[in-house]
Image (spheres, helix red, strand yellow):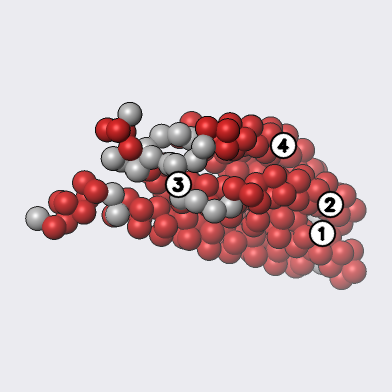
Amino acid sequence: MAGGCCGGCETTAPNKDKTWRRVLWIVLVINAGMFGAEMVAGVAAHSASLKADALDFLGDAANYAISLGVAGMALQWRARAAWLKGASLLLLGLWILASTAWMALAGTLPRAETMGIIGVLAFIANLACAIMLWRHRDGDANRRSVWICSRNDAIGNVAVVAAALGVFGTDTAWPDIAVAAILAGLGVSGGWQIVRQARSELRGLPGRRARAAT
């Protein structure tokens, strides 16, 4: 419909849209499953970085679900969904920082073996998601936000494995705490990038430009 495209329709071919939705469903299932596995392991191992990574899996699963809901809609709705996802990343990053500070004060030593095993499994899962999403990394804020989340997760999993080695080598919780803080920083940075692009797309909509001109 021509009227709908005035709001900023995507020019993606139908077959590409079907591929995009199929990939989103796959990564949604992977992230939801890894959230449960990593959260249980994080609680059992007393690991701040595993819990932070688990919450990131949960956030990504929710983000992919939102992306499936707005796929094919006008740019206005996709940009709004991207803004919501970006804001959630910012809030999640702040929550992780607060949680990490609390665990630093508690001084509980995490289990390095559990951290390492789950960290490797999480990395494999996120690497698979990143490979599937690579071809879809360009486009509007909504699609770019999905790629940013997947990229940050793969980086974070490498850091979790490094933290496990650090905990094992130093017999202290500080490597785990440091990695949790890094993951929070990635969430804040990625969230800000998404919010900034989404706001730019919303400001560029024809209706908003017309109102701004008057």
Label pair 1/2, CB-CB below 8 angstroms? yes
SS category of the residue bearing label 3: helix
At 72% from the left edge and 55% from the top edge, which residue is drawn?
154
**Residue at the far left in the pictured view:** 214
Residue beneath the point at 46% across and 51% down: 141
Q: Is residue 210 left or right of residue 87?
A: left
- Choose between 33 and 114: the one closer to the eye: 33
Please name the amino acid that badge 4 sits on: Ile
Sequence-first disc among 4 and 1: 4
Describe residue 21's horizontal placement relative to residue 196 as left or right: right
> Could you say which disc has been placed on residue 30 in the image?
4
Asked if marks 3 and 2 touch (Cβ < 8 Å), the reply is: no
**First along the sequence among labels 3 and 2:** 3
Dot 1 amino acid type: Val
- Residue that label 3 marks: 82
Contact flag, marks 1 and 3 (Cβ < 8 Å): no
The tag on residue 120 is 2
